Image: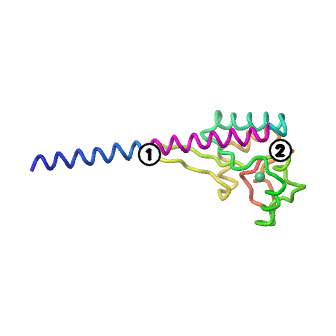
């Protein structure tokens, strides 16, 4: 009887350890993926404009050092073709000639925060107020960036562009 109980405890223990390891690996995987993506997107901008690259790099460094949030760049430099596609998908997206993304002068970002178990994300669907509360908008002003949350006709809080 006792032996069976001990076996069961060992089994539960093993399951917990394996679950913890998977959870850690997934967390590290997400982290590495975000860092590589950010690096790749910033490099694409750097090839077009060193000044834009410097501004966005500093902007992101400031966010990560001055707030509790980390940054995932979800869009940076876009080809004219890609911008045309986006315009087809949503007529509220900027036209090719107006989009700062085509010039390497805009980035779209998500923010995330890790609590002890999972990541909390701040994305496009979050309110302007949520975004302002992070302190990110205040930091963007320091760099003179235009924030997509300040558009009147389009809710685009993930967007920051060099004027
Ligand atoms: Zn954008």
Local crowd size for mark 1, using a 10 Å CA cut-off: few (<14), some (14–19), many (≥20)? some
Q: Is residue 148 left or right of residue 127?
A: right
In the rendered image, which quarter is residue 57 located in?
top right
Question: Label 1 to label 2, Cα distance in Å?
Answer: 37 Å
Furthest residue toward right = 97
First reached walking from the N terminus: tag 1 or tag 2: 1
Q: Nearer the viewer, residue 60 or 4?
A: 4
Furthest residue toward left = 1
State the SS at label 2: loop
State the SS at label 1: helix
Q: Nearer the viewer, residue 132 or 81?
A: 81
Q: Nearer the viewer, residue 123 or 104?
A: 104
Q: Is residue 163 left or right of residue 76?
A: right
Q: Position of residue 83 (x, y in %)?
A: 81, 57
Local crowd size for mark 2, using a 10 Å CA cut-off: few (<14), some (14–19), many (≥20)? many
What is the magenta range?
22-46
Q: Is residue 12 left or right of residue 108?
A: left
Q: Nearer the viewer, residue 64 or 152?
A: 64
Task: Check the image and tell me how it is coloured.
Answer: rainbow
- Numbered circles on residues, count: 2
Q: Which mark is residue 23?
A: 1
The chief SS type of the magenta part is helix
Q: Which residue is mark 2?
A: 105
Q: Quadrant of the C terminus?
A: top right
Q: Is residue 36 magenta?
A: yes
Q: Position of residue 128 (x, y in %)?
A: 70, 54
Q: Residue at x 10, y 47 (%)?
A: 2
């Amino acid at each position: 009887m006792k032996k069976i109980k001990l076996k069961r405890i060992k089994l539960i223990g093993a399951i917990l350890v394996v679950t913890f390891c998977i959870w850690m690996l997934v967390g590290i995987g997400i982290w590495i993926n975000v860092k590589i993506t950010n690096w790749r997107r910033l490099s694409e901008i750097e090839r077009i404009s060193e000044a834009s690259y410097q501004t966005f790099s500093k902007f992101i460094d400031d966010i990560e050092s001055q707030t509790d949030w980390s940054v995932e760049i979800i869009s940076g430099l876009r080809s004219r073709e890609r911008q045309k596609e986006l315009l087809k998908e949503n007529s509220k997206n900027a036209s090719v000639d107006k989009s700062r993304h085509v010039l390497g002068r805009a980035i779209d970002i998500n923010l995330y925060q890790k609590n002890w178990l999972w990541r909390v994300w701040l994305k496009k669907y979050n309110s302007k107020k949520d975004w302002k509360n992070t302190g990110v908008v205040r930091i963007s002003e320091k760099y003179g960036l235009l924030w997509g949350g300040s558009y009147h006709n389009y809710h685009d809080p993930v967007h920051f562009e060099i004027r």
